[in-house]
Amino acid sequence: MDFYFGLAQIIGVHTLLGLSAYILLLTGQVSLAQAGFYAIGAYVAGMLTVLGGWHLVPALGASAVCGAAVACAVGFPALRVKGLMLVIATLAFGEGVRLFFFNFDYQIAKGDLKVGPLGGEGFRQIRFFPENGWSTFEVMLFIWVFVAGAMALLWWFDRSRYGTVLRAVGEDELAAQSVGINLTAVKVSAMTVGGAIAGVGGGLYAHYTTHIEHSSFNILVATFAIAYPIVGGLRSVFGTLLAVIFVQGFLIEGLRFLGDWRNLLFGALIVLAMNLRPSGFLGTGRRA
Amino acid sequence: MLDFLQSLSDGLLFGSTYALIGIGFTLVFGVMHKINMAYAAASIGGAYSGLLVLKVMAAAPPALVFFGAFLGGGVAGALVYVTCFHFIPLRSPLATLMSTVGMLLLIDEIVVHVTNGMPQNYPAMFDDVMLRAGEFTLRGDLLLVFGVAVLCMAALMLLLYRTRLGLATRAVSQQPVAARLCGIRLERVNATTFIITGLLGGIAGALIGASVGTLSPLLTTPLTVKGLIVTVIGGLGSIPGAIVAGLLVGGFENVLQMYRGVTERDLYVMLLLFVFLTFRPGGIFAPRGGRD
């Protein structure tokens, strides 16, 4: 049973990652920086609980704040450029964050062993859950509380005036601007919310794996983040959840019996899915 | 000072491969206004298929392997076009972005599967030649890389500016609707562009394999990132821009590798990109009008 709880944990964290890209995709911006915010969240939360001795909940709050602050700071210069330029700018930012953590050492002695991030070797011993005796099931519930919270928040955004504004910018920037919508404010705010969600996701990720390193936040993670909402479709947050279950549950775990061939099928199925449903599983069929 | 010049010249010579990859991204962007994320992977895939020549004929000269890579790259380019672009409507840029990412993963996995995950040795030419001027040396294999890259670029320029096909390609990249009204078949031009960029990519992949000595699927991600950075620094859609930016990035990263080590090198390349995005977002050769 623990296997399924573990899988549910992975699905939960990846849903947070996907949702962080979802809100930005609503405004029509493709960001490959989500892995960067995710990494920042993971390292911040890990360092606070391990080195600072904080409880996990305030540490996750700090992750969210750091993710949001960095996203906001990156948003201003990066959102000056549009479309494909933004893809590349955010890709470079994400890689920059990864390379920063690749070169980042900050260790302190705790008891007889040294803990903390150590460059290429990564950050071991993020043992908040085992130290406090949380079972896999409890960890899963804890993660899903945050997932449900983020989904509810974004679902509510979608129903509200703010969601309409986001989609208006995504449909046609010029038209949105001409009815008095402040494009920069809308895009940067979406980026900030996305950064906060990715930060929380990263913090949770660091704690359930107990070991993080720079390669856990590579381009593949960034592409997964935008893949979920795109494959799922942008009509509602449930598309993202569905896509995460499809990718993590079916493509990665469900096809494990295929052994070596699974990885081959993985890319091919994504190509096929996009050919059959260019606007995603839950897409409207009219717009991308 | 000598060390500086040495790493600068080595970097510039190797940068010609980045320039080729950058040209591939830029050409596809020019005609379709899409990014082909699978391009670097397809190029490496093409280079791998060059190794098939060695399987058939063990004593094949490296030139034949390079030619095999050239053809393999073209096939890979055509394949990427058919699977990721042809059937997906132009209005869905996100879908093509995603499908090419899927293709990137697929090509990587095919390579891993076929080679059992082992890096493959790649034949080099003139690797025993060294041009010396006192302490300063030029590696023969890097000179070859540079020479072949320059030849490819010259051939591409001739194709684009001296043939009917090139005229059609440039017309499509300027005004797809008008080009169609003049009787140019859009699909055919798009497909040909993919084949041409694929051929270029196959050569670039082979050159990289030859100058590094081995070929591994681990090369695709850094190459994708570098190629995209080169495209942006040069200006999206600009071929001379991609050439200049490729050499610039190659030289820059090699000099910083000497001063700051290999782990920090790419961090500075990203910073270089951000400098350009802030102060010259259109790139070195910003296209007139700035459509994107």
Image: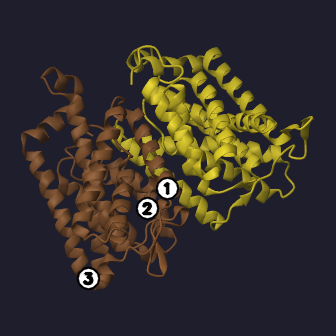
Chain colours: A brown, B yellow
Q: CA distance from mark 1 to mark 2?
A: 8 Å
What crowding class fits label 1: few (fewer than 14 Cα within 10 Å), some (14-19), or many (20 or more)?
many
Q: Residue furthest left?
A: A160
Pinpoint the chain carrying mark 3. A
A57 shown above or below A166: below
Q: Is residue B106 visible?
A: yes
Q: Is residue A79 left or right of residue B55?
A: left
Residue at image position (64%, 51%) is B262
Check disc 3 and report the residue beneath it: A134
Mark 3 or mark 2, which has the lower sequence index?
3
Please, what is the three-letter code of the amino acid marked with disc 1?
A: Leu
Work out whether residue B94 or residue A11 is closer to the camera in this orientation and state it.
A11
Q: Secondary structure at mark 1?
A: helix
Of badges 3 and 2, nearer the viewer stands 3
Quick check: can you spot residue B92?
no
Give the structural element (helix, strand or loop) at label 2: helix
Q: Position of residue B219 (x, y in %)?
A: 61, 52
Q: Provide residue B90's location: percent of width, then percent of height.
A: 35, 33
- Disc 3 to disc 1, C-alpha distance: 36 Å
Give the amino acid at mark 3.
Trp
Q: Are marks 3 and 2 on the same chain?
A: yes
Q: Do the residues marked 3 and 1 share a common chain?
A: no
Q: Chain of mark 2?
A: A
Residue displayed at 53% across by 67% down: A121
- The amino acid marked with disc number 2 is Phe
Reading the image, the residue beneath label 1 is B105
Q: Which residue is mark 2?
A: A266
